[in-house]
Image (cartoon, helix red, strand yellow):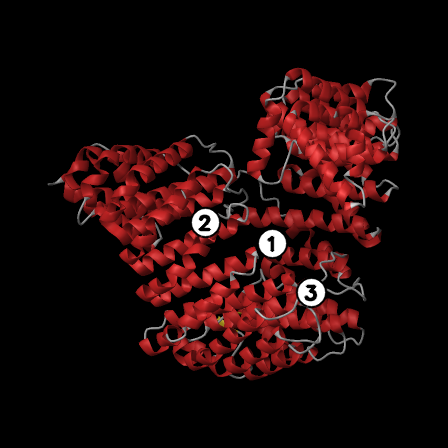
Amino acid sequence: MAMEITQYLLAAQSADAGLRTQAESSLRQFQEQNVPAYLLSLSVELANNEKPIESRRLAGIVLKNSLDAKDAVTKEHLAQQWMTVDIAFKSQIKERLLLTLGSSVREARHTSAQVIAKVASIDIPRKEWPELIGYLLNNMTKGDSSGDLKQSTLETLGYICEEISHSDLGQDEVNSVLTAVVQGMNLAENSPEVRLAATKALYNALEFAETNFQNEMERNYIMKMVCETALSKEVEIRQAAFECLASIASTYYDVLEAYMQALFELTSNAVKGDVEPVALQAIEFWSSICDEEIELQEYDTDDVGESGYPHSRFIEKSLSYLVPMLLETLLKQEEDVDQDDGIWNISMAGGTCLRLVARTVGDAVLPLVMPFVEDNIGKPDWRCQEAATLAFGSILEGPSIEKLSVLVHSGLDFLLRLMKDGNNHVKDTTAWTIGRIFEYLHSPADGFSVISSDNLPKVVEVLLECIKDAPNVAVKVCWAIYKLAEGYEDAGRHSSLFTPYIHRIIEGLLFAASRTDVDDSRLRSAAYESLNEVVRCSNVKETSHIIRELLPVILQKLSQTLELQIDKEKQADLQASLCGVLQVIIQKVSSADDLETRSIILSQADPIMLLFLNVFACRSSTVHEEAMLAIGALAHATGLEFAKYLPEFYKYLEMGLQNYQEYQVCSITVGVVGDIVRALNDKVLPYCDGIMQLLLANLSSDTIDRSVKPPIFSVFSDIALSIEENFEKYVPYVVPMMQRAAEVCAGMDSNDLDLQEYGNQLKCSIFEAYSGILQGFKSSKSEVMLPYASHLWQFIELVLREQNRDVQLTKALAAVMGDLADVLGTNTKALFGDLKACADFLGECLGSDDDDLKKTATWTQDRIKSILVS
């Protein structure tokens, strides 16, 4: 097979489907029969200069994909597979990869650099390739190294730094890598290809350079080289250098003071006179500075943030020069670009940076921006009008409401008139700006709004007229309507101001969603999202008749999608949007106090459920997610009546719980199980064995995404509360799972922020499960949980000692302590008797600003006192 691998790799790229399939099957068979030989053959193919470039390219790609994957579970499996390969095979593979770095074929060198980094990501943390860094550094220093070898070596070092943690290398190794990289940037000694590779490698290595940046001499040298490189004659090298500067702004903000004057001149010249790719990165430098200062301000005490970093106020100090520079970029629009195409250009980057500047300095931005707005807004040139509108929209988050309200009150009429301008760009940006006004200056619930009974009629009239405009404008109008409606959420009597316009707005949004003059899915989804928000934020007492009329319209549209002869992807998107609307309608109506309003759903539940069941025939994860969520809402709305749908729906519930590949569907289905059991109580019993079996299988699975597991523990709580003593037969299976999960929590790396967040979710769900199970047994079989009380208490003690609990976990912890005392009573006296940490914890909860937490802690304190004094 090794001799034949070339022909199989070539055949796997054939235009002939039959040849391709046969070749792929042969390669797969080779892999399954002998993984080490398979990997070695691929590395031999990649390294062999006599082989066709096509087979070498694919060999490298397949080898890389045999070591790494995006999916975390698959990635871990591949890493384990590599670790089991015999060391003799590994050595040969590594040797050929390193040899390939000197290949005359650029593509082979590039692929080999990537594969070496993937191997390094597995081996270096385990100290299993200690000679790699030294070998690569030797490539940079030995006299006979070609430019090609240096270039590919630097590329490899960059990829390795991207793959591993800075703690995986010793400081001596870090110093040597940085020296090699920075020397590789030297103009006098190296070719443009080497310098570009070195500059990109530095970008990836910056996180490793913390110690070096704290040393003034080393920092000066690195900054000098980056700034010199930013003046290179090659565009790609300048762009890469400015990318480094933007990253340095984020990573080493605290040591930038001495360089800021030079950096301002460098970035300013690039923004004003360089080509767009370089100018964009120069703007990104200032956006990064803003991000750092915004974060510092959130924790600011005097001039030092919580992190201990100084708040140097670079934006404030540079304001009078920085803002005019950014305003200039707003006038560099591209005339023929659809603004919704996701194209990132200099005017968009300038507007985004201006937005961050406004957040950073607040009111101080107004005197610098408003003259530009006033000078340009009335000019006949569309570029001036659009730039002025973009500038105004960009500064609406940051300055005080008092200052902005005055400006908006005087300018809103003009903006509404501008919506009828002849230029598409002007209308697009104006609609966005109006939406931003609603987002930041329209909140009746908080006691302020620029929208009143006087100007609302005109606002609605203009929006409904412009929703018929070009698709990109209509999308922004939909967003503006969304923000207008959102402002009336929980607005009490103020929401009545909006009610008279809701019928027309819904008609306008349905029109936008059904437009046939354009094939634009963005507009359809934007229209339906806005429709959802209008329904969700409306006053249900005043709008129930409108919702009653809307429901059959949406049901009919959903029914029609089942017959439409359209592209499957478009059909799925449309069905998902309509299921989303139905979910919001169901939730809104079922929240009403009066039975007459709730009857809107109860009377239509059968046809609604029938449609959802038909929608499941469409094999799309997006549709399944939305349909599942809507069914969860329907279960809540119909209560015990939902039982009649379970015989037909159960198979889809099973499918959702077994959908490991599309884990979001699985996770949502777990949530729907909770909705259903809460609605049905013990009527769900005939289905419990099957549901519990699937949930336990999911917890035992190594292939399912970890994010699904916390919701499963939480749903155990719902099931236990619903079926009470009938949960007893599941306890021997469920509680050991919870105990093992608690042990996993105890062994988690507390320094890993992602793992910390997941750990909080998992702990919270375990406590919720214990609480539900305990309370489920309270009235009849509380003794069932006695054998598990000691282990639960050990877990409680573990979490009590933690510093990084979020509010949800703290509530769940307080609640489970109370449930333990409440259900098991004096049997737990020994657990609570001597624990000072318990009293301290409850005191901390009672001092919280969170009312729910205080209420839970008070109840828990009472429960514990009652057993201690008995």
Give the labeled residue for mark 1: 360
Q: Position of residue 246 (x, y in %)?
A: 70, 43
Whichever of labels 2 and 1 marks the residue nearer the N terminus, that label is 1
Q: Position of residue 97 (x, y in %)?
A: 76, 24
Q: Position of residue 794 (x, y in %)?
A: 30, 32
Under tag 3, what secondary structure? helix
Q: Is residue 523 above or below residue 258?
A: below
554 relative position to 196: left or right: left
Q: Is residue 841 above or below residue 850?
A: above
329 relative position to 358: left or right: right
Tag 2 near tag 1, CB within 8 Å: no
Q: Return the residue nearer the eye: 591 or 733.
A: 733
Under tag 2, what secondary structure? helix
Give the labeled residue for mark 3: 391
Q: Residues within 10 Å of mark 2 (few under 14, many from 20)?
A: many
Give the labeled residue for mark 2: 657
As drawn, the residue found furthest toward the left would be: 870
Q: Return the residue nearer the eye: 340 or 401.
A: 340
Q: Is residue 376 visible?
A: no
Question: Which amino acid lies under the numbered mark 1 shown in the image of this protein?
Answer: Thr
Q: Return the residue nearer the eye: 703 or 764.
A: 703
Q: Residues within 10 Å of mark 1 (few under 14, many from 20)?
A: many
Question: Which amino acid lies under the numbered mark 2 shown in the image of this protein?
Answer: Leu
